[in-house]
Amino acid sequence: MRSNDVERVIAKANVYISNVNRLLKRVKSEIFVNFICSDNRRLLITTNKIATIFNLNIIKKYMKDLNNVKSNNIMNPRLLYYNLNPI
């Protein structure tokens, strides 16, 4: 994503989180979005649990439908794993 697109999404993150959670609730998902943050030129969307491909696609579709973000700037969602207990 372009950095100005990231800034626009972050500015309205609370609205987008609510809307995505509403969509996930409609499909009876146990996943919900905790928060949206940025990392350089991309968005990181965190969820309460590991999301399935189905849930990731719901989030991706919502993000592509935003008026202030060009849909070709949305990449395929993927799971990121962090080592929370470094050795």
Image (cartoon, rainbow, N blue to C red):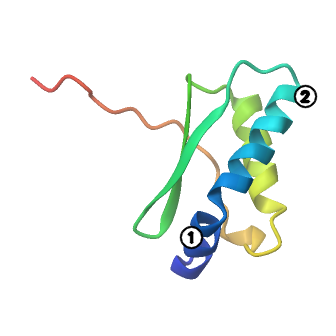
Q: Which residue corresponds to mark 1?
A: 6
Residue at figure coordinates x 85%, y 19% from the top left: 28
Q: Which of 71 and 38 is in front in this view?
A: 38
Q: Is residue 26 left or right of residue 39?
A: right
Quadrant showing the N terminus: bottom right
Residue 9 in the image, given as x and y percentages of width and height: 64, 66
**Residue type highlighted by circle 2:** Arg
Residue at figure coordinates x 66%, y 53% from the top left: 14
**Is 76 drawn above or below residue 9 in the view shown?**
above
Residue at figure coordinates x 51%, y 78% from the top left: 3
When asked about the image quadrant of residue 4, the answer is bottom right
In what element is the residue under mark 1? helix
Circle 1 packing at 10 Å, graded few (<14), some (14-19), many (20+), is: some
Q: Nearer the viewer, residue 8 or 14?
A: 14
When asked about the image quadrant of residue 15, the answer is bottom right
**Residue type highlighted by circle 1:** Val
Q: In this view, does 60 lie to the left or right of 51?
A: right
Q: How far apart are marks 2 and 1 (CA)?
A: 27 Å
Circle 2 packing at 10 Å, graded few (<14), some (14-19), many (20+), is: few
Disc number at residue 33? none
Q: Which residue corresponds to mark 2?
A: 26
Quadrant showing the C terminus: top left
